[in-house]
Amino acid sequence: MRVVLVEIWGVLGIGLVVNVGGGFFGAVDSEWIGHIRNVSDVIEDLLDGYDIRLRPQFGGDPVDILMEISVASFDSISEVNMDYTITIYLNQYWKDDRLSFSGDDAEVMTLTGDFAEKIWIPDTFFANDKYSFLHDVTEKNKMVRLMGDGSIAYGMRFTTTLACMMDLHYYPMDVQNCTVEIESYGYPMEDVVMKWKNESISEAVHGVEGVDIPQFTMVEHRIISTVETLATGNYQRLSLSFRLERSIGFFIFQNYLPSILIVMLSWVSFWINHEASSARVALGITTVLTMTTISTGVRYTLPRISYIKAIDIYLVMCFVFVFAALLEYAAVNYTYWGAKAKRKAKQTKTATDRNNEQPKYPTALIELRDVQTVESPIASLRNRSTGPNRHPRQTVEVADLTNDSPSAAAGRRGLRGGLGQTLPGRLRQASAVQRRRHLFGDLRKRAREIKDRLPTVKDVNKIDKYSRTLFPSLFVVFNVGYWCFYLLQKIKNRMGQE
């Protein structure tokens, strides 16, 4: 007995195992061969005279296209490009009476994807699609099933990149809504009406529960049906919405925890001696540059948007704390060296005052002048002419008046006349000057009072002592307010959606 494998390839791709023995076909029935030939003839008859340019029920009621989606995987989500990549199985169901070969819908013929090029299929497209491709390993991932009553199931597997406009105000504690929007490109609602299969999310969408998304958690998904009004007519649009909640664990270890440690590191300078300038300045600059590097890394992973995000507020405040720690040492250094310079200036002034208290002229010089006065009669006459009570300036003025030229005298007379004519103006000007002096005097007095009320730092170590308590306290208060606000907003948004 010999066993021979005979493959009979037809349109249906059916393989039969034929046992050959004793020189005759024992298992091959002539009815099977006739059935295969009949199926081929049926398909040829269905396609004979079939016009793929015309939709089913052309000129009559619109065709109902039922949609079914099975999610294979979420490949990536990009905040920079505002899109996400997903691999899905899309199945479309409709009825074409021209392809009916029996009245029983239980009879099913599974055909290759190439058969779809010979019949009418919907011009379905994704409204928010950026880039898509059909998988073709090992063959094109397409499938056509033809029922006896003319019902058709058309399926394919492909990967698509879809636009997803994100609101990043609460990033990285945000919740995003990304959609898959399906629509007919050329057929309005008068020709094609798209519907979700059985109008039920449990039957129209599959595989979402088992999807694992990096950095996100699938909160919920829902189906939506809307009508889009365009210049060419009204089109039915089906939307599958995914509500994605971002997981913050990655950002805790990547951004928040390093920022907290850098801020705490900047406080170490408060325990370093203020005279160790190189150590404190190097530590302050290092922490500032590190915070700048962290902020730059976060900006590279986000789009260039104008509004402020939650992580921006935290990083900016950490930068402020680090920079304030560096300025604190500047204040300590200025106070220390400024007080030292004041003490030195005060000592210099005291020494100068002591030197000024000594007599300007030596005693010997005074005695010599007295001797000269007694021995010289000319000097005595000069002293009499000036007199002890007469001021040298008055004498010069008299000489000037007697020796003036006529033009100078006329100028003085004109000046005296002008002064006499503008006496009220001079009084007003003097009054304004006096008011300004009083105003400036009051301001200086108040500034002096405020300065006297301010505590005087005699020991610069007290600044470091207060900073050791003030900086950590303010940072703790900021963290409590920050996390309470954004976590409450996250819970509020989640409850609002439910």
Image (tube, grey):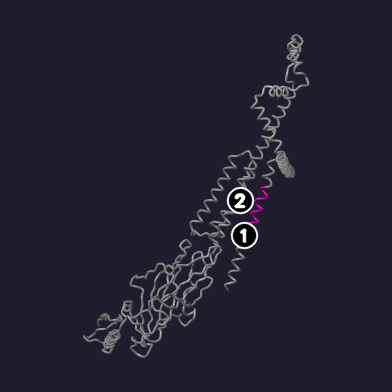
Q: Which residues are magenta?
A: 467-478
The residue lying toward the viewer, choosing from 373 and 216, is: 373
Instruction: Please determine whether, in this image, residue 402 is positioned above or below residue 99.
Output: above
Residue bearing the label numbered 2:
321
Occupied quadrant, residue 424: top right
Picture residue at 63% right of the left edge, 56% below the top = 478
Residue 37 visible in the snapshot: yes
Residue bearing the label numbered 1:
482
Q: Position of residue 290 (x, y in %)?
A: 54, 49
Q: Position of residue 247 (x, y in %)?
A: 54, 64
Q: How many marks?
A: 2
Instruction: Please determine whether, in this image, residue 277 is positioned above or below residue 309.
Output: above
Q: Amino acid at mark 1?
A: Tyr
Instruction: Please determine whether, in this image, residue 491 is positioned above or below residue 290.
Output: below
Picture residue at 66% right of the left edge, 34% below the top = 341
Packing grade of label 1 (10 A; few <14, some 14-19, many >=20) is: some
Residue 444 visible in the snapshot: no
Q: Who comes first in sequence, dot 1 or dot 2?
A: 2
The residue lying toward the viewer, choosing from 447 and 201, is: 447
Packing grade of label 2 (10 A; few <14, some 14-19, many >=20) is: many
Instruction: Please determine whether, in this image, residue 59 is positioned above or below residue 83.
Output: below
The residue lying toward the viewer, choosing from 322 and 207, is: 322
Q: Amino acid at mark 2?
A: Phe
Which quadrant holds the N terminus? bottom left
Q: Position of residue 226 (x, y in %)?
A: 48, 77
The residue lying toward the viewer, choosing from 243 and 308, is: 308
Cα–Cα span, label 1 and label 2: 15 Å
SS category of the residue bearing label 1: helix
